[in-house]
Amino acid sequence: MANKNNNIVVVFDFDKTIIDVDSDNWVVDELGFTELFDQLLPTMPWNSLMDRMMKELHDHGKTIEEIKQVLRRIPIHPRVIPAIKSAHALGCELRIVSDANTFFIETIVEHLGIRKYFSEINTNPGLVDEQGRLRISPYHDFNKSSHGCPRCPPNMCKGLIIERIQASFSKEGNKMKMIYLGDGVGDYCPSLGLKAEDYMMPRKNFPAWDLISQNPTLVKATVRDWIDGEAMEKILMGTANEIMSSDEEEEKEKMLCSDHCKISVVGIVHEPMLPLSLQVPLHLVK
């Protein structure tokens, strides 16, 4: 079983980060509904549009099994799965934060055999109703209230999710270092909430990377970009190992300091007493 004492949390976006495409677009395109999707896109939020598209698929006789078959052949870089397995084997805790939906993500990660490596998946609910239609709901119900972040889409602020993760570790009194991997506009907000000891890994030449590049000083975390799955694996593993080595060095220094302090105290307490000066009779003095 992996050692969970390292307190390294690796947060992955899903679309164009774990998988190489956008899962929403992939399903719509593969099932032949791109034209309708493009027509409706300017009229409603993305999350609402995907729920509407699932209705259209159902109305046109597309089954849940057909959607699953499309999802199972989604493209993924061959080094991403080894990267996920290696990070988990090192003892990192892995989580997904995505603006896709539970049905798409669960179908894909189960098919790829990597579901067990993630302790948490934060995304929009996707459930099949009694009629066999996939219903996609917002992670944050914006019809009831706003999440209050002007940078993010109404249904999800990833920055707030990262804040919750940080707070949960802080509450337990655990020091946590986070590595965040993402590509999209929605991954910029969480990058602003990372701490100086954290790492942001934006995909190079994608929207999150572009936004960070415009004003790098706004991101306190160390930024390390990557271009594909091979680079992701190399940089992620290098960063995780670097954090672990640094933490081990800190522990050694603490132990050395502790031992030195003990030796010093023992040395003082057990210092042998100097012999008392003897009074020599005057007649014996030459």
Image: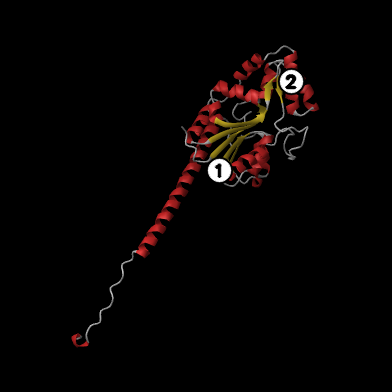
The amino acid pointed to by label 2 is Met
Asked whether residue 214 is in view, the answer is yes
In the picture, residue 262 is in which quadrant? bottom left
For label 2, count other residues whose C-alpha is less than 10 Å away and answer few (under 14), some (14-19) or many (20+).
Answer: many
Please say if 284 is above or below 89: below
* Count of picture labels: 2
Q: Are marks 2 and 1 in contact (CB under 8 Å)?
A: no
Q: Residue at x 76, y 37 (%)?
A: 146
Task: Indicate which disc, 2 or 1, sits on the residue closer to the N terminus.
Answer: 2
Query: Closer to the observer: label 2 or label 1?
Result: 1
| Residue 92 on image: x %, y % | 52, 36
Q: Is residue 136 left or right of residue 176?
A: right
Q: Amino acid at mark 1?
A: Met
Residue under numbered circle 1: 176
Q: Residue furthest top?
A: 61
14 or 203, nearer to the observer = 14
Measuring 49% from the left and 36% from the top, which residue is drawn there? 91
Name the foreground residue: 280 vs 92: 280
Left or right of 57? Residue 167 is left
> What residue is shown at x 64% (from left), y 26% (from top)?
102
The residue carrying mark 2 is 53
Q: Position of residue 158 (x, y in %)?
A: 67, 36
The C terminus - image quarter: bottom left
Determine whether the residue tagged by mark 2 lies in a helix, strand or loop: helix
